[in-house]
Amino acid sequence: MKIELQCIIKGKVQDVMFRDFAQRKARSLDIVGIVKNQPDGSVEIISVGEQEDIQKFLVLLHKGPFLTRIKMRIESVEAKFNEPTKKFNDFIIVY
C-alpha cells in the first residue's frame, strides 16, 4: 500500500548535501516526491512510496549522509503519514 510522508528535518541540514542524499536514497527505494530547503534552515520532504520503503527512507533520513556527519547536526525529524494526496513521477530537488 502506498503512503505519503511529509517530513521536516531541523538542525544543521543545509549545505551538507542532505537534499542530494535524500534524492539518492528515495530513488534507490522507488520513492517519488520532492525535497527542498526552507528559509528557516530546515529541509522539507514530501514523498510517496510503499509503506515498507517509506519506513526505510525515514530511518535513513534520521541518519543523514555519512560523509558529512561531522558538519551536519540533525536536531529533530517531524514526520506525518497520510494517504497520498500528490502525484509525482520522480524524486526531485526543488531549488
Image (cartoon, rainbow, N blue to C red):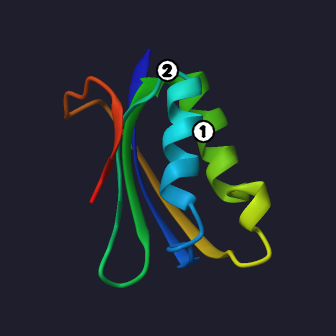
Name the residue located 33 percent from the left edge and 27 percent from the top edge: 90
Instruction: Kindly identify the amino acid type of the residue bearing the numbered disc 2.
Output: Asp
Q: Which residue is mark 1?
A: 57
In the displayed structure, would residue 40 be above or below residue 1? below
Which three-letter amino acid code belongs to the residue tagged 1?
Phe
N-terminal-most mark, 1 or 2: 2
Q: Nearer the viewer, mark 1 or mark 2?
A: 2
Q: Residue at x 52, y 75 (%)?
A: 10
**Tag of residue 38:** none
Name the one closer to the observer, 32 or 82: 32
Figure check: 83 above or below 71 = above
Left or right, 59 with reference to 85: right
Q: Quadrant of the C terminus?
A: bottom left
Q: Which residue is mark 2?
A: 30
Q: Which x, y percent locates residue 50?
A: 49, 20
Residue 9 or 92: which is nearer the viewer?
92
Q: Residue at x 59, y 73 (%)?
A: 76
